[in-house]
Image: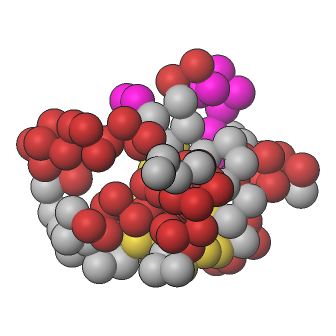
Amino acid sequence: MAKSLHDFVSEALKTVSEVTPEEVIEIQRSGGYKILDVREPNEYGDGHLVGAVNIPRGFLEVKADLEHYKRDESLADRTQKIVCYCGGGHRSALAAKTLMEMGFEHVRSMKEGWTGWTARGLPTTKDE
């Protein structure tokens, strides 16, 4: 029987540590974490968190293409600390779980994603 997206996200959240946008601000201040934008490429036009790195395509397809990400130089260091975010939050959890399965130990998911970030009026450029 096929699982729904809700089922996949619920399963991912059992092992993924979620953080609020406010906690991400503190993580950014303390340094040491890479912020990954795992939204779909057509969503990038809306900007992204200060200092975030766009992953070239959505993480929903990663399961079918793990070898590509294993070769991705930006993900070569499995000891790096990562926070993932997307538009809402479900993809962040799925991306974080995928990274954990790839051997990353310090991965978190931004709970409310980009929509939670902008709803709070948090900065989207360095000079805000």
Is residue 35 rendered to the left or right of residue 124? left
Can residue 90 be seen in this snapshot? yes
Q: Main secondary structure of the magenta part?
A: loop
Number of marks:
0
Asked if the stretch drawn in magenta spans residue 56, the answer is: yes
Where is residue 23? Give x, y as percent.
68, 76
Where is residue 48? Give x, y as percent.
62, 39
Where is residue 15? Give x, y as percent.
46, 80
Relative vertical location of residue 122 with respect to residue 60 in this rendering, above or below: below
Range shown magenta: 43-57
Asked if the stretch drawn in magenta spans residue 42, the answer is: no
Query: Which of 101 and 20 lies nearest the eye of the viewer?
Result: 101
Where is residue 104? Give x, y as percent.
26, 71
Q: Quadrant of residue 45?
A: top right
- The structure residue drawn at horizontal position 89% and vertical position 56%, both measured from the top left corner, is 120
Is residue 81 rendered to the left or right of residue 114? left
Can residue 123 be seen in this snapshot? no
- The structure residue drawn at horizontal position 68% and vertical position 65%, both measured from the top left corner, is 111
